[in-house]
Amino acid sequence: MLVCCVEMDMGTMNKKQLRAKFARYQVWAECDIGKEYLLNLYRRHGATDPRPTFRVLVVAKDRCDNDERRVAEVLAAASSFSAVLHRTWITTVTRLKERQNDALPLGSAVWRKVVGGPDHPLFPAPDIRSWCEPRQLVRLSRGAAQSQFWSPK
């Protein structure tokens, strides 16, 4: 089980705004309240040995159709925040569209951890369907933000 905070980036935030967003994730990752929230969330969903971990999943779309440039901008903004950079996985709307007919498009190898790096599947299991069937997508709303994560069977 892994908490994933999903960010839909439409290319409207400038570099300063992106850095501010990642700074807030950094504070949340390091503060006791954020850690306790994550631990309680995992316990509530059956984790027996929870750890305060999470990923920030960014789906990026550049306003000028240069998605790779936007990926670089987003990762550059995250790079100043060590507690966030290693948690940030990014893909593009285009890559997801190419995999939209897969059984689990978000689980496809479309996620990058660094600019120009290899694509990774979201879930580490060799056969993702055996790991998360039946799929249980748990949505947690807190204000305007939504976090989503998969819960294994």
Image: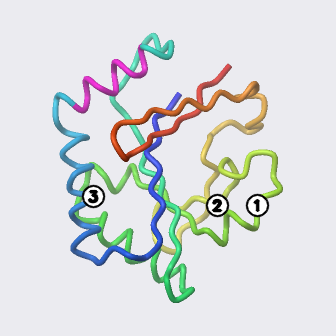
Left or right: residue 88 versus residue 139 is left
Element at badge 3?
helix
Q: Earlier in the sequence, mark 3 or mark 1?
A: 3
Residue 18 at x, y percent in the picture: 29, 68
Q: Amino acid at mark 3?
A: Phe
Q: Dots 1 and 2: beta carbons under 8 Å?
A: yes
Q: Which residue is mark 2?
A: 110
Determine which of the numbered discs, if any, sits on residue 43 in the image: none
Q: Position of residue 53 (x, y in %)?
A: 37, 34
Q: CA distance from mark 2 to mark 3?
A: 22 Å
Residue ID at (43%, 45%)? 5
**Residue 39 lies in magenta, yes or no?**
yes
Tell which tag, 2 or 3, sits nearer the viewer. 3
Report which residue position mark 1 lands on: 99
Viewer-nearest residue: 107 or 12: 12
Residue holding disc 3 = 22
Residue 150, picture quadrant:
top right
**Disc 1 versus disc 2: nearer the observer:** 1
Q: Secondary structure at mark 1?
A: loop
Which mark is first along the chain, 2 or 1? 1
**Rendered view: 74 above or below 136:** below
Residue closest to the eye, 132 or 44 = 44
User: How far from the left and from the top, in percent, is residue 113?
Assistant: 48, 60
Q: How many marks?
A: 3
Give the structural element (helix, strand or loop) at label 2: loop
| Amino acid identity at mark 2 | Val
Rendered image quadrant of residue 125: top right
First to last magenta residue range: 34-43
Q: Is residue 69 above or below residue 21?
A: below
Q: Residue at x 29, y 78 (%)?
A: 14
